[in-house]
């Protein structure tokens, strides 16, 4: 493997995750950080730490020149971007490659191709992967009206670039389409610098299913599927592996389609194919590809035993995949919940503070990926994600029980967290039955299901 000195161009729990995985491979780690993150756990754990700018992300973690200078100054031979920030920025990947360094992820051309949702859709169709009926490419409003009439309302107006639920609107009729398309275009332009749009059929109450893949540029394998349907404002809250709504035949077809698409683009590294699944018709449709490691990757690791971060470091360093598809088996069920420094009883208001006490959940099949320690000041400048509690058990019911026990045993003093939300979800009959979809959580919250209980200050 060609990687000896790895620079980690991210922060928070994913930076800790990458540092630990790299060090386990015998790699020297270099952690970059903003002025506000000088005391973060990843900076303490890495072999070296380098400040690359002020607190504002645009002046530090999103500053390509500063990241590359840090890599050059420390003699790094590779850069791992984690998730978010520059992880799916083709210009950054290209700049890393042009600097003679290894980008731990796919080549810039792949990021460019799959990062544009219209281009990704076209690649999927060419690979024989089902896509949601809609426009073949970027469209003007007049074309949108014509296509919407042919595929039927409601339709989803989507930004061609970007993610995170931005630039998305649902139109129930032509009048709404005329009103909402310019809004979506403006939002996409502001968020991504690209106002391009396309439309597709809106599927009623879909499940959000994704497939974890690994590739070495020639071959590709899947590590089975995850369900990420419990979402608030199109942000995932609770994730599971596998998806209990799928039968074995559908699962096999879904995972095979993901591998076909990964091979079609000669994918290198860890990536995720996202699908909408229509339970009523047993149909699945490709929606987009994430050309990076995902926040929810641990549930796939728990059911397969594969270290996805280590594997992506190895293949991007020039190694071939260390396993074949028939060597990858899944065992039991895993659940991950995202712990954020937010008060779920105050409309999820951010709650940065000093960690006054930390008691981690422990036990067989329990994992806590985080970047906390007692005395740590949670900065107010970044995403509120503090960490993830991940559990694995033989069955889904047992996994939920284990999740409850893990959450109840954990203490994070000095801040509010979203723990009460996850405990309430774990006791909900519909969640217990797996009877939910992507539009389930927000009405559940609005109906007052998240009641105040003792111990919510944890």
Image (cartoon, rainbow, N blue to C red):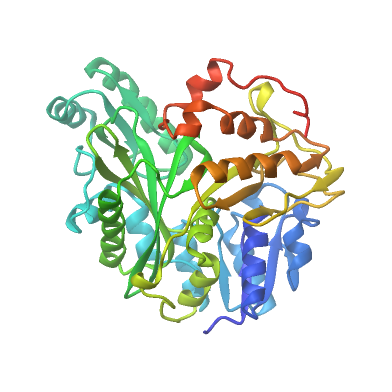
Taking the view exactly as shown, the residue that stands out farthest to the left is 150
Q: Is residue 341 visible?
A: yes
Quarter occupied by residue 186 = top left
Quarter occupied by residue 309 = bottom right
Q: Residue at x 68, y 61 (%)?
A: 16
Quarter occupied by residue 108 = bottom left
- In the image, residue 438 lies at what x, y percent? 41, 32
Q: Residue at x 68, y 35 (%)?
A: 419
Q: Residue at x 53, y 84 (%)?
A: 2
Q: Nearer the viewer, residue 193 or 365?
A: 365
Q: Residue at x 57, y 31 (%)?
A: 425
Q: How many marks?
A: 0
On screen, residue 167 versus residue 254, left or right, reads right
Q: Nearer the viewer, residue 224 or 66?
A: 224
Q: From the viewer's perspective, is residue 172 above or below residue 241?
A: above
Q: Nearer the viewer, residue 377 or 206?
A: 206
Q: From the viewer's perspective, is residue 154 above or below residue 9?
A: above
- In the image, residue 229 lies at what x, y percent? 44, 37
Q: Nearer the viewer, residue 75 or 238?
A: 238
Q: Is residue 103 visible?
A: no
On screen, residue 304 versus residue 26, left or right, reads left
- In the image, residue 363 lies at what x, y percent? 70, 55
- In the image, residue 222 lies at what x, y percent? 37, 63
Which quadrant: the C terminus? top right
On screen, residue 312 versus residue 176, left or right, reads right
Taking the view exactly as shown, the residue that stands out farthest to the bottom is 1
């Amino acid at each position: 493997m060609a990687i000896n000195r790895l620079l980690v161009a991210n922060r928070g729990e994913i930076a800790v995750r990458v540092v630990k995985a790299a060090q386990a491979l015998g790699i020297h780690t270099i952690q970059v950080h903003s002025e506000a993150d000088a005391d973060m756990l990843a900076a303490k754990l890495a072999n070296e730490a380098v400040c690359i700018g002020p607190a504002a992300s645009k002046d530090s973690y999103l500053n390509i020149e500063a990241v590359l200078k840090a890599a050059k100054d420390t003699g790094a031979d590779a850069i791992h971007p984690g998730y978010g920030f520059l992880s799916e920025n083709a210009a950054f990947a290209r700049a890393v490659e042009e600097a003679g360094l290894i980008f731990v992820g796919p080549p810039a051309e792949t990021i460019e191709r799959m990062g544009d949702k219209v281009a990704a859709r076209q690649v999927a169709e060419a690979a024989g992967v089902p896509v949601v009926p809609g426009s073949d490419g970027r469209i003007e409003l007049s074309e949108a009206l014509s296509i919407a009439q042919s595929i039927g309302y409601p339709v989803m107006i989507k930004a061609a670039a970007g993610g995170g639920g931005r630039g998305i609107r649902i139109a129930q009729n032509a009048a709404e389409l005329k009103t909402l398309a310019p809004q979506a275009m403006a939002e996409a332009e502001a968020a991504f610098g690209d106002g391009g749009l396309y439309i597709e059929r809106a599927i009623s109450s879909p499940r959000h299913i994704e497939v974890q893949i690994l590739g070495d540029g020639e071959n590709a394998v899947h590590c089975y599927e995850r369900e990420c349907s419990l979402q608030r404002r199109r942000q995932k809250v609770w994730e599971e592996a596998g998806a209990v709504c799928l039968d074995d035949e559908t699962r096999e077809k879904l995972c095979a389609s993901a591998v076909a698409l990964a091979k079609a683009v000669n994918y290198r590294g860890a990536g995720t194919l996202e699908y909408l699944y229509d339970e009523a018709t047993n149909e699945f449709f490709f929606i987009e590809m994430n050309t990076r490691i995902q926040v929810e990757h641990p549930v796939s690791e728990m059911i397969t035993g594969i270290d996805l971060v280590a594997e992506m470091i190895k293949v991007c360093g020039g190694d071939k995949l260390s396993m074949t598809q028939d060597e990858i088996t899944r065992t039991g069920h895993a659940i991950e919940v995202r712990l954020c420094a937010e008060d779920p009883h105050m409309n999820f208001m951010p709650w940065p503070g000093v960690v006054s006490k930390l008691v981690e959940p422990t036990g067989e099949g329990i994992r806590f990926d985080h970047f906390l320690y007692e005395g740590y000041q949670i900065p107010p400048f970044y995403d509120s994600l503090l960490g993830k509690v991940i559990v694995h058990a033989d069955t889904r019911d047992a996994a939920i029980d284990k999740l409850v026990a893990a959450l109840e045993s954990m203490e994070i003093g000095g801040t509010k967290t979203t723990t009460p939300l996850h405990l309430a979800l774990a006791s909900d009959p519909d969640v217990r039955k797996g009877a939910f979809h992507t539009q389930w959580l927000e009405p559940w919250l609005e109906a007052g299901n998240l009641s105040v209980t003792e111990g919510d200050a944890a």
